[in-house]
Image (cartoon, rainbow, N blue to C red):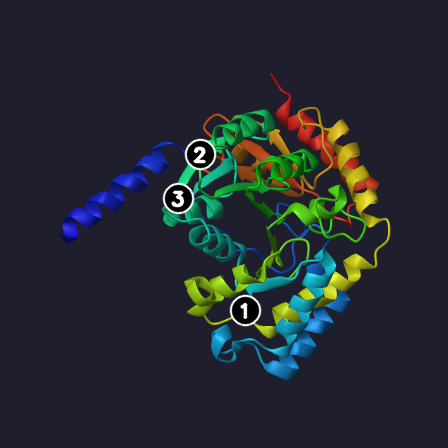
Amino acid sequence: MRQKLESRIDAALDQRVAAGLERVLKVRASHEALLDLANNDYLRLSQHPQVKAAAMAAIERWGCSSSASPLITGFTEAHAELLDTLKSWYGFRAGMLWNTGYAANQAVLGKLPQRGDLVLADRLIHNSMISGLLSSGARLQRYRHLDLKHLASLLAETEKEERTVFVVTESVYSMDGDYPDLQAMAELKRRHGFVWIVDEAHAIGWYGQTGSGLVEATGVAAEVDVLVGTLGKGLGSMGAFTLFRDERLERYLTHFAGEFIYSTYLPPACAAAAQAAVEIIANAAGQAERLQAMSRKIRRAIYKAPVGDAPIIPVRTDDPVAVASTLCAAGYRVGAIRPPTVPQGEARLRISLNANLSEHELTRLAETINAETTCG
């Protein structure tokens, strides 16, 4: 029995190595000379003095751990304050905090859709969403990426069916830095009455008058049934949240989501740091417009970059690992993304912008990337 297991593992690993897709864990030092354009700290709030001070004050008060699951003693005043702030920021009635965005999507999409339901999801939704949906027992049908005509045709086919239909999308897509027409999706929601789940993980802080994301920027919050967001990207902390129009969804997941019930809760320091980050973002008038303008400008300067204004910029290249290594030698860390994270044939560099980048850094970055990705 053990030999079969070992053979199976060796075969799988050998296959990845042979395909040039081996994953290697690398240690990052606290102080590096590299300009880091690979992480998701889009506003650099993880290093903001106010955010760090809030986390340290919470550690002094609560210690380094919540020390229990949320339904025992893990849900502290720091968590409650953050949750109230998030509900007010987005204008939702109910919500929950989670240890990670992966856990949040696993729970929401693994528990709310059930056998007999239909889920229509964008072809490029995150692995956490797919994993949750596949465990739900619901029928999953995927529409072409950002193709709302395809989605509308699938919805039209369900009109005479008496079953619950869910539509699942991200706002900003994590590997492509693009996004759907949320206003058009809201119109489809009004027409067809599906349950709409939107993951705002990569839009928080980059869009909206108060920085809460694309749902705010496009004015569709009233149509969204479940909004998922993370604390560990634009908010510079760790954890995730889900917000609900219907309070019964919160109660249901509190009773049935193992990801919430059976795990020690995220530390109070994470909640306090995110609380400070929300306050900074909500009071930063005009920041979203500046960040989007920066993205548009650098995209125009990088020859292979697609049009857009999100913080994530994909640059297609056959060998992203080699190009990323060359960029590292030039002083830049960027993501080297390969299958199966992205579809076969769509390997790319993934550049993550941040609010602290200077004009000089952006200009030099574009020149360096162009030199490495346009040869031949």
Q: Vertically, is 214 above or below 147?
A: below
Left or right of residue 73, residue 310 in this image: right
Q: Secondary structure at mark 2?
A: strand
Looking at the rendered image, the quarter that the C terminus falls into is top right
Residue tagged by mark 3? 138
- Front one among 162 and 219: 162
Q: Is residue 199 above or below residue 259?
A: above
Question: Residue at the spot x=60%, y=29% of the render?
Answer: 148
Q: Quadrant of residue 15?
A: top left
Residue 327 visible here? no
Q: Which label's residue is closer to the chain start, 2 or 1?
A: 2
Specify the label residue 232 is tagged with: none
Quick one: label 2, few (<14), some, or many (20+) residues within 10 Å? some
Residue type at mark 3 is Ala
Residue that label 1 marks: 266
Rendering coords of residue 290 (x, y %):
83, 43
Q: Check disc 3 and report its element: helix, strand or loop.
A: loop
Judged from the image, the secondary structure of the residue bearing numbered disc 1 is loop
Pinpoint residue 21: horizontal percent, then vertical percent: 42, 36
Image position, residue 331 (x, y; %)? 67, 43
Q: Which residue is mark 2?
A: 141
Q: Position of residue 255 (x, y in %)?
A: 45, 67
Which sits earlier in the primary sequence, circle 3 or circle 1? 3
- In this view, the residue in front, 59 or 155, is 155
Question: Marks 3/1: CA distance?
Answer: 30 Å
